[in-house]
Image (spheres, rainbow, N blue to C red):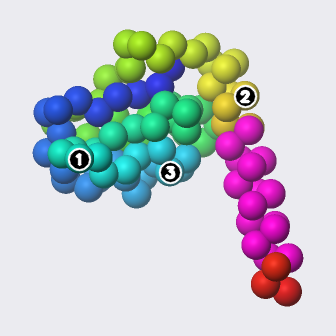
Amino acid sequence: MALLITDDCINCDVCEPECPNEAISMGAEFYQIDPHKCTECVGHYDEPQCALLCPVSCIPLHPDWRESKEELQAKYERLTSAKAAAEAEAKAKAA
């Protein structure tokens, strides 16, 4: 499952820097979570950091985006390997 930021968001800027997958960004009116990048912090932490730190508790599970822990782990592995490959490519170009 991915998480969802509701319109109760007060744009406090607490969640965005805590997301290890860089899945959170500012939307038109309030922050939003890219479900393609959200792993609910699987692979990084025991629980979703954004939901844990949100002062207004506006980050529930996304009702339309259901994934098992195994699917979230696989997504984490894809995201981290893609990030590592991009960093290695950038380092090679800089050398």
Residue 86 drawn at (x, y percent):
75, 61
> How many numbered marks does the figure carry?
3
Q: Earlier in the sequence, mark 3 or mark 2?
A: 3
Residue 5 drawn at (x, y percent):
29, 33
Residue 59 visible in the current orientation = yes
The secondary structure making up most of the magenta span is helix
Q: Which residues are magenta?
A: 78-92
Amino acid bearing label 2:
Ala
Amino acid bearing label 1:
Ala
Callout 1: SS: loop
Residue at 60% across, 42% down:
44
Residue on which the image places disc 3: 22
Judged left or right of residue 48, residue 39 is right
Residue at 26% across, 41% down:
54
Residue on which the image places disc 1: 28
Residue on which the image places disc 2: 74
Query: Is-magenta flag for residue 84?
Result: yes
Callout 2: SS: helix
Residue 55, by quadrant, is: top left
Looking at the image, the residue that sits furthest to the bottom is 95
Residue 22 drawn at (x, y percent):
50, 51
Callout 3: SS: loop
